[in-house]
Amino acid sequence: MTKSQSQATADTNTNEEPVTVTFEDGIAWVTLNRPAKRNCINPAIVYRMCDILNDLESDDRCKVLVLTGAGDAFSAGMDLREYFRATDDKPAERLKLFRANGQWQWRQLRHYAKPTIAMVNGWCFGGAFTPVIACDLAIAADDATFGLSEINWGIIPAGVVNRAVSQLMRERDGMYYVMTGETFSGKRAAEIGLVNESVPLEDLRARTTQLAKVLMEKNPAVLRTAKVSYRIASEMTWEQGADYLMAKHAQSVIEDPENGRNVGMSQFLDDKTYRPGLGSYKRDVK
Ligand code: COA
């Protein structure tokens, strides 16, 4: 997806960037930026997010990617006007747009090379569930409001929402929210495992930063293989999983520029300078 494509579909109602990226101490804060529209996802956001995810994967300023929303919303889901109604009679444009949306919301995010955290600061509806679920980890504000609202306006949770929800939620919870469209809080999202935890809104950024720093202490090559192989192995049989993980383990040792396995073992067994059960080995990082 090129920058010119994203410009060609830029939000006609505002000159604001549809998504902003700021870098701070290794964290790339990627912020959906249509607060007046509760950051609902229009074509400009879709194409911009494809570019941004591509770019950040090889940008050294991004060690951890945090996805969040400007103002009082994470995202009110897909834009009913620009994503749906405007493409009703344009099947070719719709196909391209829907494909691009799947590209950033889960194909890129689910197996992203860098660790990802969804920071759900407020409203989170429908299509916005997909990137939250696709991120590796998620933290919500206690009072954020989640809702699978599709049923309320006459569609099913499509895109890949039903698939994504069934990956994380217990069937009783998933079916309940899909069928009732009832909203639930960030606290409830944590109880049912949709997010890792919820915290008061005023602590949300600090807690997210703290978690990102923990991830930054780890060996990035091994962290990448650990998280990607977790998801891929979860869809295999045990026999396939064991064989695949053995191969990924060997690959990650061979391809680790830090030689972390041997350094860590030596620091524990020979130097006795750390305990692997209690934290990371001392990395020689400039
Ligand atoms: N698609 C298109 N426009 C949307 C939108 C969406 N998903 N969500 C919000 N907006 C627009 C509203 O139309 C409104 O535009 P306007 O100022 O031009 O009238 C603006 O964003 C603000 O929305 P508003 O409803 O006034 O804000 P609120 O704070 O009172 O309520 C929500 C926030 C999120 C509860 C409400 O906007 C809503 O229900 N949005 C739809 C959520 C949804 O069902 N998403 C699923 C899509 S898959």
Image (tube, grey):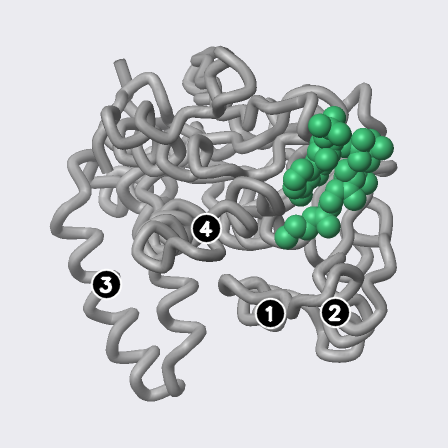
Q: Which mark is residue 248?
A: 3
CB at mark 1 closer than 8 A to ligand 1? no
Q: Earlier in the sequence, mark 1 or mark 4?
A: 4
Q: Are marks 1 and 3 in contact (CB under 8 Å)?
A: no
Please name the residue that numbered disc 4 is placed on. Answer: 87
Please name the residue that numbered disc 1 is placed on. Answer: 162
Q: CA distance from mark 1 to mark 4?
A: 22 Å
Q: Nearer the viewer, residue 25 or 187?
A: 187
Residue at 33% from the left image edge and 88% from the top image edge: 239
Q: Nearer the viewer, mark 2 or mark 4?
A: 4
| Mark 2 surroundings within 10 Å by alpha-carbon count, few (fewer than 14), some (14 through 19), many (20 or more) | many
CB at mark 4 closer than 8 A to ligand 1? no
Amino acid type indicated by mark 1: Asn
Amino acid type indicated by mark 4: Thr
Q: Which mark is residue 178?
A: 2
Q: Position of residue 161 (x, y in %)?
A: 57, 63
Q: Earlier in the sequence, mark 3 or mark 2?
A: 2
Amino acid type indicated by mark 2: Val
